[in-house]
Amino acid sequence: MKKDEKYANTKFAVASRTKSVDWAHDLLNQFELKEWLDYVEIFPGDKKKHFNNLKRSSGIDFEEMLFFDDARDGKFGNCEPVSAMGVLSVHCPNGIYEESIWVNAMSQYKEWYAHKTPGTIVEWDGSVTTMKPTDPNERFRGNVQFINREKRFGFIQYGGRGTKDMFFHFNDLPYGDDINEGDELSFTVVTARNGKDAAANIEISKSDTDASDLVNMHVFSMNLPFVALLSNGYKTLETRNGTMFVPYEAGTKMLLHAGQRIYPDGDRHIDVMKSGGLDDDEIKALKSLPPGFGKGMAVAIVELGETFETTLEERCDPDFQRKVAAFGADAGMRAT
């Protein structure tokens, strides 16, 4: 690509938040990539800082950049925060493993450049999403997760599982009020002097909830469409390569949380469901969350059965595939 005259004036860069800085540089050298990279930003921290450094060292404005990353959003996501800076971001969960990803991104960039709307992401399936601009007056609610009284700062846990904890400084607390870990706060989000998000206009919520009305339950999260298939009773087996459910006995009840994203399986679950005789309308209904529920909410209480290991041959059985809503080759080795 570097030798292609079409990209003679194009600069190439790498930006990584890894803590294994030396290892990352060593990989670039082993694959002989350093020689065609114009800029390298590798250090743990905030992806926004990487891009501010790239803008400063290259003199290239954000709207002149095109960013590829495998992590879209949530606590470890990169596409969402970088796109909010005005950089067209391309979500490629498996990397740029085929030329069509690059070609489509270039085509989308040409169209996007006419309006340069911040918060635009080219999704894994080639579609384009534009995030809603942040309302500076929007208030959020969360609980104090951590406090460092000596340095006078803390973090608030809020939103879904993938939401990064929000930083706050004691200077932004109501005058004279004291807080403790677990306290509920409401707040707005501002950009601090270091370029990172921080809580502001903080109010401390006074709760009069009777603790006897509360129930503690474990919770696990799934993305659409599988969270809907499970909550609607179609999906009766969950498979994972990890040991998430191994510690829990059969009969354990858990809350099922609907994640914010759609799992990119290329709609292969539809072929599995059709193999059992379901039509398009039936599949559409099963893929929809129950009425009144949406992304980011607890949508059902599920009871776990036994967790057991499977072979690929067992996972490829048609009945097993329909219970999982996935082909055997796509399923994990442990079934619950």
Image (spheres, rainbow, N blue to C red):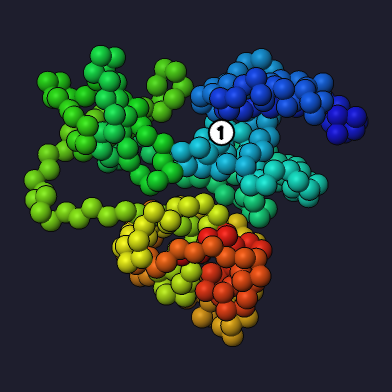
Report whether residue 24 is seen: yes
Q: Depth check: 197 or 36 in front?
A: 36
Q: In the rendered view, would you say 44 is above or below 124? A: above
Q: Quadrant of residue 127?
A: bottom right
Q: Position of residue 302 (x, y in %)?
A: 35, 66
Q: Is residue 323 left or right of residue 304?
A: right
Q: Position of residue 71 (x, y in %)?
A: 57, 41
Q: Position of residue 217 (x, y in %)?
A: 27, 55
Q: In the rendered view, would you say 59 is above or below 136? A: above
Q: Position of residue 51 (x, y in %)?
A: 60, 24
Q: Residue at x 29, y 14 (%)?
A: 151
In the rendered image, which quarter contains the N terminus? top right
Report whether residue 171 is seen: no
Q: Is residue 105 left or right of residue 48?
A: right
Q: Is residue 35 left or right of residue 54?
A: right
Name the element at disc 1: helix
Q: Residue at x 31, y 63 (%)?
A: 253
The residue labelled by disc 1 is: 82
Q: Depth check: 35 or 91 in front?
A: 35
Q: Quadrant of residue 56?
A: top right
Q: Residue at x 16, y 38 (%)?
A: 205
Give the residue type that dot 1 points to.
Answer: Val
Q: In the rendered view, would you say 191 is above or below 252? A: above
Q: Quadrant of residue 247?
A: bottom left
Q: Residue at x 55, y 70 (%)?
A: 325
